[in-house]
Amino acid sequence: MSEKLLGSKAAPVRFEGVSKVYGKHVVAVDKIDLHVEAGKLVTLLGPSGCGKTTTLRMIAGLEMATTGRILIGDRDVTTLPATDRDVSMVFQSYALFPHMSVLENVMYGLKFSGFDKAEARARAIQGLELVGLKGYNDRLPSELSGGQQQRVAVARALALEPQVLLFDEPLSNLDAKLRRQVREDIRAIQQDLGLTVVYVTHDQEEALAVSDEIVVMRNASIAQIGSPRSLYDEPVDTFVADFIGEANLIPCQITSVEGDTATIEIEGHSHSLPSRGLAVGPAILAVRPSRLVISEDHGAPARVAKATYVGVRMEYTLEGGFGQVFAVQDDVDTPLEVGSDVRLAFAKNGPVLLPVE
């Protein structure tokens, strides 16, 4: 079964002007266009209430679109019930039956999909092998760790050979150590089998770690779509910059633009960087904590307000006429003292200009 399991069935997903409205006035998803390529892992990322889970549930058929079209492969599934969509969903709660063995849990959905008992068992065993649980057939869910229970839920979804596999906050019930391992497991399975996966999370680090592409959502609409690297390095606005990883948002003044290069000024300190289409005038400089350069003699004047040792690095809160910023340094042997005066500058690469909103 491994040769045909999922990989050859992976299908793209397309949203064309899709909205979901509850009642007359509650807009959960507002006219979004989205294309998920076959064999890719795409994450819907955003704060609570942004519409990401509703979008996922509309793919599954658990919510019906109010307007627009949803296609899986070449088939319009907009009005089809969940049972006719050829998708599988891994829920946040895992939804395992406590009185059934691991194998019985994985076989459960296959019983209702037209497979005889022998084939259902074979598919379930193969699904467990794919997620690294060979030999766990007879155990009960209560005898498994949280990470192993998550893998059983994935195996149950894989055994149905869906065109699209959906994950709804799959790591939220796991502790910090398990999260990293399980997200790596999910990513490895997706890549090995060439699955089309749509994955919902509110955790930025999780999204950056597992995704081919990230869809950042805000207020029922899409704020930006891109690869993890492009979203981190080239956010389109202050919301995306602040939501994808930590970013310091510093008011600045663009004093000149020559070609594609702008010169900005912050508290008397000048810095040149790509203009990104902005003109002379006020702007926002988005800078990651690791891209701030702290020195004694170069940059805008600042003072160390807080200094925290976290083992592998020092974390600093700096204050100045530009406001308050968060910076990190690898030098843990000679930390800066709270109250000391320093200068703040910016790395050559990394900081980006954003428009004032």
Image (cartoon, rainbow, N blue to C red):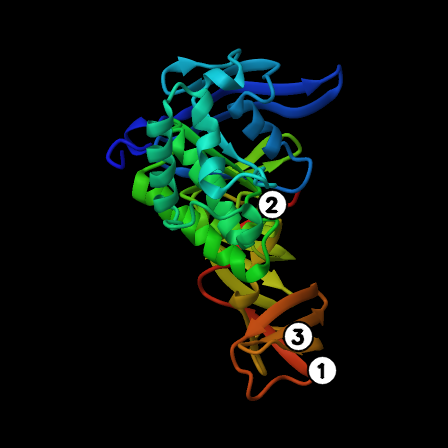
Which residue matches tag 3? 301
Three-letter residue code for mark 3 = Pro
Numbered badge on residue 202: 2
Estimate how packed mark 3 is, as few (under 14), some (14 to 19) or many (20 or more) residues with alpha carbons within 10 Å: many
Residue 231 shows in the view: no
At mark 2, the secondary structure is loop
Numbered badge on residue 338: 1
Q: How many marks?
A: 3
Which numbered disc, 2 or 3, marks the residue that appears first in the sequence? 2
Q: Nearer the viewer's eye, disc 2 or disc 3?
A: 2
The answer to whether 42 appears left or right of 216 in the picture is: left
Rendered image quadrant of residue 66: top right
Three-letter residue code for mark 2 = His
Identity of the residue furthest to the left in this view: 3
At mark 3, the secondary structure is strand
Three-letter residue code for mark 1 = Val
Q: State the CA–CA distance, disc 2 to disc 3.
A: 36 Å
Estimate how packed mark 2 is, as few (under 14), some (14 to 19) or many (20 or more) residues with alpha carbons within 10 Å: some
